[in-house]
Amino acid sequence: MTVPVPALRLEGIVKTFPGVRALDDVSFSVMPGEVHALMGENGAGKSTLMKVLGGIHQPEEGQIIVAEVPTVMTSPLQAKSKGIVFIHQELSLAEELSVAENIYLGELPKRSFGRVDWGSLYAQTDAILSKLRVGFDARTRVGDLSIANQQMVEIARALTVDAKAVIFDEPTASLTDAEKVVLFDVISDLKAQGVGIIYISHRMEEIFKMTDRISVLRDGQYRGTLVTADTDEDEVTQLMIGRSLDLTRAASTHDLGDVALEVRNLSCGHLFQNVSFAVRRGEVLGFYGLVGAGRTEIAETLFGLRDPSGGSIHLDGKEIRITSPVDAIRMGLSLVPEDRKGQGLVLGMNCRDNMTLPQIGDLTAGPFVAEGAEIAIFDQYRDKLDIRTPGWKQTVGNLSGGNQQKIVIGKWLSMHPSVLIVDEPTRGIDVGSKSEIHNLIRELAAQGYAVIVISSEMPEVLHVSDRIVAMYSGRVMRTFTSDEVTEDNLIQAISGIASEQVA
Ligand SMILES: Nc1ncnc2c1ncn2[C@@H]1O[C@H](COP(=O)(O)OP(=O)(O)OP(=O)(O)O)[C@@H](O)[C@H]1O
Ligand SMILES: [Mg+2]
């Protein structure tokens, strides 16, 4: 009998960046037909390890062994030729090109005289897309697709290869539940075909549903491997952050203040209709619903990014009109957006400037920006949010995904808004920092902020909210107090089962 050989093995990998030892002697392997989770805090080195594997970064030490053959990876295209394919955390598609061109970039099918064979390119692409049950075709321009659909293009690209190993780096961060089902089917198919799969995610639920083993990195070091069926969330958390988490929430002890923001019968075309709610100072109001229920669109309307088609918005009892984000900020509203890459950050700019960007006006003394004040703000929120970076000069694009999200949160907190709206505040954030951010949200409320939290994660909404607005298909189905709400009645409300109630 032959002993099974790993599809892929990494041995003693070392990778440093200026000021950061991102990978410190890391070894790791994945067997054919295995789904192997890679976990660790934000900045632990997961994406870097995968970029070493994909030939994007060259390690200073260590070896990559593909099916027992030591291999030097020089570029993503070469890694692909060895059967190693990536679905990256930050999408890497050419927006101006079609779906088909993106999928077969560098290897377009050719006719004689080297002309691209568009007919077979589109046919091959559509065959793959039909497996993924997506609603676009080979000719669609990638820039016209939603983030979720762009993710599906990356997945389609992986399926064109006779893969030995496929790496998914936080693939579900922007997918709807229906899209997740398709993704998990794809993963199961690949597994059945004997492909080794590396799955990076902070979502414990998915990890326990999808994976066979879990390996953990911490501060760039390998911490161990657990068999998924024999472990639990607490053990994984311990290994990741060195402690257990207390997820129970202390009962609110502070009194609520006056109503800060009230919305009456607000509508925006077909996106949402007749939405009414009020949030008081000291209160956290949660918005829960499926992707597409209209929650993000409400936030965008409050922040002046969309024009309401009806209804009114009142701040401190006075009706207001918000026609732009500049208006919103001036009136004391802040929005931490859902899509940090598109709306929250300038990736080529350093950490400090990203954090203080919206308040440059306030910090400017005459023509000069008060640099000391900016650095002080950065330092304060770096400590508060535990942002891992060698210093404020670091380019935000070089931070790990979760640390980028923390910069966005810091940016809006530092403005001391009277109403803070956070949309999916912990997307891509590790379990330890997640509970810190939840505590921070509660703390802000205790200090008298009115906070609106939009989330697709039920435990998150239940944990941070004083009351929860349940939305379905652009409408408020019901507003729950924390005494009334249960998982069951919340699910019913967001599925459109419970009857509509006036809040
Ligand atoms: N190109 C780069 N230049 C400088 N530092 C980098 C670069 N890429 C990564 N780093 C640093 O290396 C460390 C590991 O980052 P990495 O992206 O691998 O973390 P991660 O485990 O994927 O985290 P997350 O869960 O937040 O995605 C971080 O401190 C990060 O800032
Ligand atoms: Mg990462």
Image (tube, helix red, strand yellow):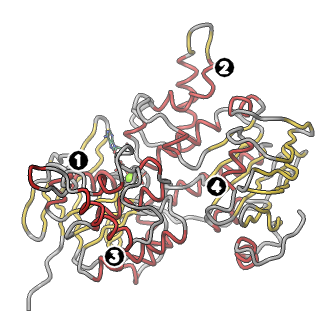
The Cα–Cα distance between marks 1 and 3, rounded to whole angstroms, is 26 Å
Residue that mark 3 sits on: 213
Mark 4 surroundings within 10 Å by alpha-carbon count, few (fewer than 14), some (14 through 19), many (20 or more) = many
Asked if disc 3 is less than 8 Å from ligand 1, the answer is no
| Secondary structure of the residue carrying numbered label 3 | strand
Q: Position of residue 81 (x, y in %)?
A: 14, 60
| Secondary structure of the residue carrying numbered label 4 | helix
First reached walking from the N terminus: tag 1 or tag 4: 1
Mark 3 is on which residue type? Arg
Q: Nearer the viewer, mark 2 or mark 3?
A: 2
Mark 4 is on which residue type? His
Circles 1, 4 touching at the beta carbon (< 8 Å): no
Asked if disc 1 is less than 8 Å from ligand 1, the answer is no
Q: Is residue 186 above or below residue 79?
A: below
Task: Specify the quadrant of the image occupied by residue 285.
Answer: bottom right
Please give the name of the residue rendered at 13% of the width and 56% of the height, measured from the top-left corner.
111
Residue that mark 2 sits on: 362
Circles 1, 3 touching at the beta carbon (< 8 Å): no
Mark 1 is on which residue type? Ile
Q: Is residue 247 visible?
A: no
Residue that mark 4 sits on: 438
The Cα–Cα distance between marks 2 and 3, rounded to whole angstroms, is 51 Å
Circles 2, 3 touching at the beta carbon (< 8 Å): no
Q: Position of residue 498 (x, y in %)?
A: 80, 77
The Cα–Cα distance between marks 2 and 4, rounded to whole angstroms, is 28 Å
Residue closer to the observer: 406 or 112? 112
Residue closer to the observer: 46 or 296? 296
In the picture, the disc for residue 56 is 1
| Secondary structure of the residue carrying numbered label 2 | helix
First reached walking from the N terminus: tag 2 or tag 4: 2
In the rendered image, the quadrant that contains the N terminus is bottom left
Q: Nearer the viewer, mark 1 or mark 4?
A: 1
